[in-house]
Image (cartoon, grey):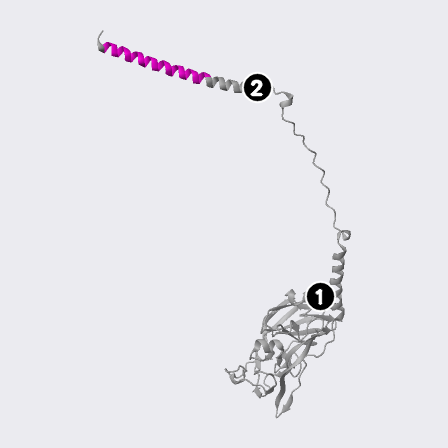
Amino acid sequence: MSRSSIDIETMEDAVDAVASRRESRRSFLRNGAVAAVAGTLLSACKPVAASERAPKTVAKATPPVSPPVAFGVDDVSAASIAAADEMDRMHEAGIKAFPAASKGRGNQLLAPRIERGVKVFDLTARRMQWETEPGKVTEAWAYNGMVPGPMMRVRAGDRVRVNIKNELPESTSIHFHGVELANSQDGVPFITQPPIKPGQSYTYEFVPPNHGSHMYHSHHNSTKQVSLGLLGAFIVEPRDSSEEPHADVDHVLILNDGLNGFTINGKGFPATEPIVAKLGQTVRIRFMNEGMMIHPMHLHGMHMTVIAKDGWAQPQPWKCDTLNVAPGERWDVLVKCNNPGTWAFHCHILPHAESEHGMFGMVTALIVK
């Protein structure tokens, strides 16, 4: 046999041997895998002894839900009841004290003296102590010793003279808010006049052309001076009184806020003054906001009919029970008193009117007898 024949036979034998080994390995793996799977299945199907079984989970009974218990007085602590009693006591005391007596009364009518046909009003501005409510005394800067200053009433077309003497520790002036005057009488230092220095006097003289509910106040360091009390009502009646609507009671409410608190006509509740009318009468209320905040004034029990804003008649009167009075605004309303009783009348920004201690500040009442 040649070398080539031996090599070929040898190679074929080697290939057959490798193939045989591969087949044996495949058979081993295949048979082993089948055995493993079978063993697993047999094991899973094998009965489990009682001692090897997992303990059963016993469902616990859910306790019944109790119905809600009504909340009653017996569930309130003695401390809560005592606190409520104390709060109620303070509220009641304030109501029973109204209208409480206090020293001083502002917004009183100042009658002019007549000099050659001129209506002359004399004012003095000075510091003083002012009782805003019983026991609460603060420093005020006032015209003629009252807050608000005296009410001045004239008629459109009257010649008016206002003399002011300054006894304050700083300069001042007077601006007649809403009255359409000649520029020289507008009362703004360094724009229309020099400031009125301490110890000096000054005279304003003019003829008011437009009637309505107007105001007068300082226009120098006004944040301080007006909030301390340098303010008042300046009312100009129309030349022809028939132009005015009928009113049995005419009442001015000047609102202020700032250094002396929340006040109506210089007083805080319970020292505020009620408006009093008889059943069937008509009350005219003139709101004037001399403060720095908005005050929505709310009347209980009856509506208000709005007839004028800033002295100007409304094109059409309209009704409301809450009237928003912004700083510098004046509103005139009529109230037909057809519902007897004592009716709360207050600013409806509640922190201006009531707290846990009771009513205070911008609260008064309309009493219909």
Q: Quadrant of residue 78?
A: bottom right
Q: Which mark is residue 324?
A: none
Residue underneath mark 2: 45
Query: Which stretch is magenta?
Result: 4-31
Q: Position of residue 130 (x, y in %)?
A: 68, 78
Q: Nearer the viewer, mark 1 or mark 2?
A: 2
* The stretch drawn in magenta includes residue 68: no
Q: Earlier in the sequence, mark 1 or mark 2?
A: 2
**Main structural element of the magenta stretch: helix, strand or loop?**
helix
Q: Which residue is mark 1?
A: 358
Q: Secondary structure at mark 1?
A: strand
Disc 1/disc 2 C-alpha distance (Å): 84 Å
Identify the image quadrant of the N terminus: top left
Q: Nearer the viewer, residue 359 or 167?
A: 167
The outermost residue toward the right is 74
Residue 28 highlighted magenta (yes or no): yes
The quarter of the displayed image where residue 209 is located = bottom right
Q: Nearer the viewer, residue 324 or 260?
A: 260
Q: Quadrant of the C terminus?
A: bottom right
User: In the rendered view, would you say 96 is above or below 172?
Assistant: above
Count up the numbered dots: 2
Is residue 93 among what the camera can see? yes
- Residue 44 position in % (x across, y down): 56, 21
Residue 65 placement, left or right of 168: right
The residue shown at (52%, 20%) is 40
| Residue 301 vs residue 350, the one in the foreground | 350
54 to the left or right of 64: left
Q: In this rendering, would 20 be left or right of 242?
A: left
Percent of width and height locating residue 276 = 73, 73
Nearest to the observer: residue 349 or residue 114 = 349
Whether residue 341 is visible to the viewer of this picture, yes or no, is no
Residue found farthest to the top: 1
